[in-house]
Image (cartoon, rainbow, N blue to C red):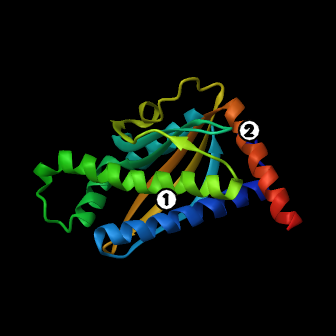
Amino acid sequence: MTSIIGDIEHDAVTEILNIAVGQAAASLSRLVEDEVALSVPFVEFLTPDQSATRLDEATGGGLSVAVRQEFHSNFSGDILLIFPERKSLDLVRSMLADTVPLDQLTELEQEALIEVGNIILNACLGSLANQLGLTIESSLPTYVCGRGASILDSKNVESELVMFLQVDFSVAAKGVRGYLAFVMDIVSAHSFAATVSAYVARVVAG
């Protein structure tokens, strides 16, 4: 199931999402009045179990926090921006210029991460919509906390696919690593693959 998309289509998705996070970085830079750099070093197509294992490895089995949105188009699912819990605090403190004591961060952390997530998730969905020629609708972002499998909240691990991306942040000269996950059922995953294939064909045809 994880070979659902070919190498050329995989490269196209990676390029589209790198463009998206570049646009998101510009928006975040304006928000925090400091340079923010974002990049997507890799995109993988994994099962929900494989994705949960990746997250647990990144946190040492600890908690992750995420911003989640549902999206609907000719393919549908959930998109999540995920951080190990401690790294999310590093990101928030970078954005707030270390002015807020750690014991006061809980509510502000959620608000700040939802703001960051809203910018990045909408940039990704917007870039996919623009490049693939689609209309994509999305829900309001929500904040969730848990370990790998509970964060992904996969409804059926046997019939779902996760497009899993590493996202590297550089904010206020500090490095923070997070992850993006698109969780789709197999029907939506096939529709996504077909849409990307059609996009590649249009690009090749000029």
Question: Which residue occupies 56% across, 51% down?
Answer: 125
Mark 1 or mark 2: whose residue is earlier in sequence = 1
Question: Which residue occupies 42% across, 56% down?
Answer: 119
Q: Residues within 10 Å of mark 1 (few under 14, many from 20)?
A: many
Q: Amino acid at mark 1?
A: Val
Q: Position of residue 62 (x, y in %)?
A: 34, 41
- Please determine whether, in this image, residue 20 is positioned above or below residue 6: below
Mark 1 element type? strand
Q: Which residue is mark 1?
A: 167
> Of all residues shown, which one is farthest toward the front?
135
Q: Position of residue 77 (x, y in %)?
A: 57, 35
Question: Which residue occupies 40% across, 40% down?
Answer: 140
Q: Amino acid at mark 2?
A: Ser
Q: In which quadrant will I find the N terminus?
A: top right
In-front residue for pair 10/204: 204
Q: Which residue is mark 2?
A: 191
- Please determine whether, in this image, residue 192 is positioned above or below residue 166: above
Q: Is residue 1 visible?
A: no
Q: Residues within 10 Å of mark 2 (few under 14, many from 20)?
A: some
Q: Quadrant of residue 161?
A: top right
Q: Is residue 141 visible?
A: yes
In-front residue for pair 126/177: 126
